[in-house]
Amino acid sequence: MPEPHSAPDPRNGVPRFSRPVPLTFEPTEAAGDEERFFDLESISDPRELLARSTDLSLAFQAAADRAVEFQAMAAAQLADPGRFDRLSEAAIAERAEWSEDYARKMVEFGRELLRRRPPQ
């Protein structure tokens, strides 16, 4: 399970918060072909293959980091004592298939994210 924070960029060690490279969707005919992955197998130049596969890797990592942040905010909202339907950390852990300790950390992380979030 990923840790509840943004992963450092392997290029310079600082957290990434920039918009990731857009993902190119698979053509419809390639959807059933398990050998095809974002058309990477058709790139013959290793420099281009490294660049594109790195872009995809960073895009997926950034998407995963953002998804974890949204998980944490949802966990914090579900654990909010002001909610009449508040869930315990154990119940949140069960729903998300986390350990109770990880759920506690995610609730804390989510509360921090919600405090830093600008009012809408």
Image (cartoon, rainbow, N blue to C red):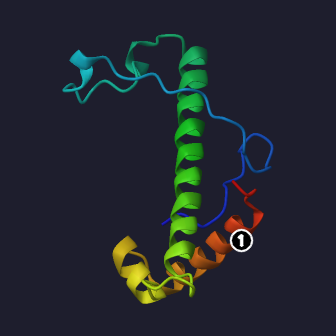
Crowding at mark 1 (Cα within 10 Å: few <14, some 14-19, many 20+)? some
Above or below: residue 35 compared with residue 70 = above
Relative height, residue 57 to residue 36 (above, below): below
Looking at the picture, tell me which residue is in the foreground, 107 or 11. Answer: 107
Q: Name the foreground residue: 17 vs 80.
A: 80
Q: In front here: 90 or 44?
A: 90
Q: Quadrant of residue 47?
A: top right
The image quadrant of residue 119 is bottom right
Q: Residue drawn at (51%, 82%), measured in percent from left and top? A: 83
Q: Is residue 93 left or right of residue 2?
A: left
Q: Residue at x 36, y 27 (%)?
A: 37
Q: Residue placed farthest to the left in the image? A: 32
Rendered view: 62 above or below 116: above
Counting from the top left corner in percent of width and height, residue 72 is at 56, 67
Q: Can you give x and y, in whole percent of width and height, for residue 12 in the image?
A: 80, 43
- Image point (59%, 29%), residue name: 55
Q: Residue at x 53, y 63 (%)?
A: 2
Measured as percent of width and height from the top left, residue 115 is found at 74, 69
Asked if residue 49 is positioned above or below residue 66 in the image, the reply reads above
Figure disc tally: 1
Residue 57 image offset from top left, x and y in percent: 54, 37
Residue receiving disc 1? 112
Mark 1, secondary structure of its residue: helix
In the figure, residue 96 lies in which quadrant?
bottom left
Disc 1 marks a residue whose amino acid type is Glu
Residue 13 lies left or right of residue 2; in this view the side is right
